[in-house]
Image (cartoon, rainbow, N blue to C red):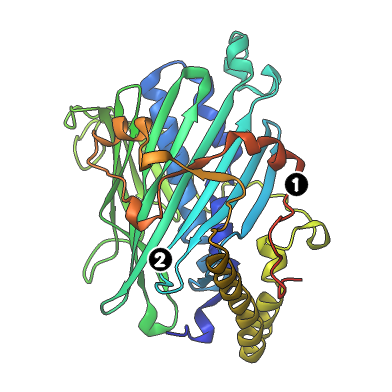
């Protein structure tokens, strides 16, 4: 089914990984906190700050949600953020594309952060010993999406993210929300998140995030209530965060307005006024042929001009070239070699399994072509931008 022109976007889904760390200072904040419950709260806050960029930024920019470009196998999106806290590297790679089921694909990403000096620690934490002055942060995960239609578009996200805080030897499992599209009938679609997600920590804390939207008579769109509590003690709420993830939310100690009458307001975060850090991406002439911006440049230009003939021609070039590559691989008895990520043997991940038990999450390896993790041996390639592809190039990508 071809998307109508008004809903087409110029961004590949591979680029969506960038939304996870557009607030680097919030991403690294947990390292400066020595209390494990407060660290878990800061991880929860960071995740909530990613939702606006992930699910609403295109609506703010264009006036409505846009359908992303469907990535091709081997597509890469590389970049970095630089701010007063140091440098965060991003690697996003498409590791699967099923032509027989175009609504199902895998998206991978990796983000890394280091505090280079105690100079960049919050003023109240500059007395921390050396281990806290240089911290490694790692966020990696994968995502497959399955779309269906029943009065509107429903999307189930399959996969998860793992946030690792090396300085405290902590790991956090983050589950992904399902979503649906509202406003299609009016020609102004927007994303609404469904049900609930969890963040489970190895330090013994769990966050549950319940999503809700605007009903016929009450409620506000993009609303949520998140609670943080010790694992297995859901009624012993330590912190509550509630509001609208696309606008602002309040962080409170205790149960929050809907659970306990008495709660202390700790902080208010405004998504609309909070400044994001721009992602630095190499110019097109320095990118490899499989990097998103270069690969889709002609398709994006056609969309911007509103010329669907150009879009169809340029998009078909990429798709036909990919089909030819798959036929050649099949004839030669080989498969596409992933650039930065590797599939875990036996589709097993001990870290995931241990944390997933606490929230009922499970691996669906059959729907994501395996369980994927960043290949640490490729770290030097990432930092050196060695992204040339050793296989036959996609002839239509220039």
Q: Position of residue 301 (x, y in %)?
A: 70, 78
Residue found at the very far front of the displayed protein:
332
In the depicted view, which residue is nearer to us: 188 or 295?
A: 295
Image height of 269 relative to 332, above or below: above
Q: Quadrant of residue 380?
A: top right
Residue 123 seen in the figure: yes
Residue 290 shown left or right of residue 170 in the figure: right
Residue 77 shown left or right of residue 355 in the figure: right
Q: Quadrant of residue 310?
A: bottom right
In the depicted view, which residue is nearer to us: 139 or 62?
A: 139
Residue found at the very far right of the displayed protein:
285
User: Residue under circle 2?
Assistant: 104
Q: How many marks?
A: 2
Query: Which residue sits at x=26%, y=37%?
Result: 256
**Quadrant showing the C terminus:** bottom right
Query: Which residue sits at x=27%, y=44%?
Result: 362
Q: Residues within 10 Å of mark 2 (few under 14, many from 20)?
A: many
Q: Are marks 2 and 1 in contact (CB under 8 Å)?
A: no
Q: CA distance from mark 2 to mark 1?
A: 29 Å
**Quadrant showing the N terminus:** bottom left
Q: Earlier in the sequence, mark 2 or mark 1?
A: 2
Q: Which mark is residue 386?
A: 1
Secondary element at tag 2: loop
Image height of 14 relative to 81, above or below: below
Residue found at the very far bottom of the displayed protein:
309
Image height of 57 relative to 34, above or below: below
Query: Which residue sits at x=57%, y=58%?
Result: 336
Query: Which residue sits at x=40%, y=32%?
Result: 172
Q: Position of residue 307 (x, y in %)?
A: 65, 89
């Amino acid at each position: 089914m071809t998307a109508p022109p008004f809903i087409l976007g110029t961004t590949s889904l591979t680029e969506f990984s960038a939304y996870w760390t557009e607030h680097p200072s919030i991403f690294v904040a947990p390292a400066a906190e020595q209390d494990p419950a407060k660290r878990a709260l800061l991880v929860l806050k960071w995740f909530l700050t990613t939702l606006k960029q992930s699910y609403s930024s295109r609506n703010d920019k264009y006036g409505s949600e846009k359908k992303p470009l469907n990535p091709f196998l081997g597509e890469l999106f590389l970049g970095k953020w630089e701010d007063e806290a140091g440098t965060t590297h991003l690697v996003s790679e498409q590791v699967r594309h099923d032509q027989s089921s175009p609504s199902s694909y895998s998206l991978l990403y990796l983000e890394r952060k280091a505090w280079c000096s105690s100079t960049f620690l919050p003023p109240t934490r500059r007395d921390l010993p050396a281990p806290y002055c240089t911290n490694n942060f790692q966020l990696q995960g994968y995502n497959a999406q399955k779309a269906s239609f029943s009065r509107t578009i429903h999307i189930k996200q399959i996969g998860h993210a793992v946030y690792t805080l090396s300085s405290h030897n902590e790991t956090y499992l983050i589950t992904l929300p399902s979503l649906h599209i509202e406003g299609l009938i009016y020609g102004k679609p927007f994303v609404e998140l469904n049900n609930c997600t969890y963040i489970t920590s190895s330090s013994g804390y769990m966050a549950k995030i319940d999503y809700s939207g605007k009903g016929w008579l009450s409620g506000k769109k993009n609303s949520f209530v998140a609670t943080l509590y010790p694992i297995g003690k859901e009624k012993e709420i330590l912190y509550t965060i509630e509001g609208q993830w696309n606008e602002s939310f309040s962080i409170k100690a205790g149960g929050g307005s809907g659970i306990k009458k008495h709660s202390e307001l700790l902080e208010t975060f405004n998504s609309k006024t909070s400044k994001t850090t721009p992602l630095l991406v190499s110019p097109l002439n320095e990118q490899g042929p499989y990097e998103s911006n270069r690969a889709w440049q002609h398709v994006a230009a056609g969309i911007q001009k509103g010329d669907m003939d150009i879009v169809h021609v340029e998009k078909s070039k990429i798709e036909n070239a990919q089909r030819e590559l798959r036929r050649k691989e099949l004839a030669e008895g080989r498969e596409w070699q992933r650039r930065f990520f590797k599939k875990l043997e036996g589709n097993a991940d001990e870290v995931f399994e241990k944390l997933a038990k606490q929230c009922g999450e499970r691996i669906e390896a059959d729907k994501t072509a395996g369980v994927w993790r960043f290949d640490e041996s490729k770290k030097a390639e990432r930092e050196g931008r060695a992204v040339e592809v050793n296989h036959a190039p996609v002839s239509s990508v220039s």
